[in-house]
Image: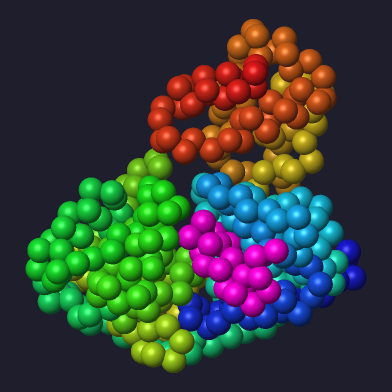
Amino acid sequence: MLDGRVVAVLGPTNTGKTTYAIERMLGHRTGVIGLPLRLLAREVYDRIVAVRGPAVVALVTGEERIVPDRVQYWVCTVEAMPAGSGCDFLAVDEIQLCADPERGHVFTDRLLFARGMLETLFLGAETMRSAIAAQVPQAQFLKRERMSTLSYTGEKKASRMPPRSAIVGFSVDSVYAIAELLRRQKGGAAVVMGALSPRTRNAQVEMYQNGDVDYLVATDAIGMGLNLDITHVAFSATAKFDGRRMRPLMPNELAQIAGRAGRHTNNGTFGVTGEARPLHEEVVTQIVEGRFAPVKKLLWRNARLEFASPDILIRSLEEQTQDEWLTRVRESDDLAALKSLSADAEVRARASDRQSVELLWDCCRIPDFRGIRSTEHATLLGQIFNH
């Protein structure tokens, strides 16, 4: 597998990286592409189905699973990429998420171990060049330039937003409040966020793309590669809750979202609205010119797991690394669930051999789709395992 071609395709938003990966994949007999968002996976799935038909294309995310009998091409979220598929082609999009505190260890695992038999592509930001060169010495680099210009327009009221604008909020409450304001003043707005069901979310995107409404209100999820017809992006806030605390968005994060404006060769603009304060001149320059600090650390978790017992599995998950590029991920939800269930007498009695411990770990990796307290979610996982 190491003889396969490995290429890092790096550049800012709107450089056609994802389209390039799709074209490369369709040039092979079989392929897998891992994407950062369920909504983006659905978009790419639809594009490939339009070319090759639904009989040979699979879609696997945390919400949807479409797997025909004769699968040639797998379109997945990065977490759902099939292990050891042996496909000719493999691609991972937004590889800079190796540095993400929550999901970084999954992307790092794909960077280190996921390969196509003939060709592998890692798509992402130029900030990953040094890290990829260090961790994947055989990688070649292909730099792509943005196809349109991006400019800053400062502060505007929501009522003065130009048509084909996207307003970005960082909470469900703010998204719905902005959408209601636009409906009263502008006549309509589509809402896109992860909390919506797949059917509702897809319908909202289609409503905006078809021109039924001229305004889109969304969470920062739209920053991860969605190809929408957006002319202007406005931030209603420049800080968000990251699961642990409120923190300001980094310039590269702002750029990722702002870059949704001006797709293909159409120029785009970005600015702020509502309670968001105008961006500092230095931040604006970084966004417009695409100059950001390189990634120095990749989040990591040991992938060589031992399943002799729950305690040994926990110990292998908490193993440290001596690699200067890698830093161990903070305790993730699946590990916290494993520790909680390992303290349950019935679960410990059942998790008595390798097969049952592997099953326990599979159960612990079921995401908390309901967004409930960790103890309640662990209780559900325990019930699933015991069944």
Rendering quarter of residue 165: bottom left
The picture places residue 378, in percent across and down from the top left corner, at 53, 23
- Locate residue 269, reporting x and y percent: 30, 82
Is residue 42 visible in this depiction of the protein?
A: yes
Say above or below: 299 vs 209: above
Location of residue 271 (image quadrant): bottom left
The front one of 95 and 33 is: 33
Q: Residue at x 42, y 66 (%)?
A: 223
Q: Tell me which residue sits at (65%, 65%) in the image.
A: 54
Colour scheme of the picture: rainbow
The spot of residue 2 in percent (x, y) is 88, 66
Q: Is most of the magenta stretch helix, strand or loop?
A: helix
The residue under the point 68% across, 74% down is: 52
The quadrant the C terminus occupies is top right
* Magenta stretch contains residue 33: yes
Q: Is residue 378 magenta?
A: no
Span of residues in magenta: 32-55
Work out whether residue 203 or residue 75 is closer to the camera in this orientation and state it.
203
Rendered view: 111 above or below 256: above
The image quadrant that residue 150 belongs to is bottom left
Q: Report if residue 239 is visible in the image.
A: no
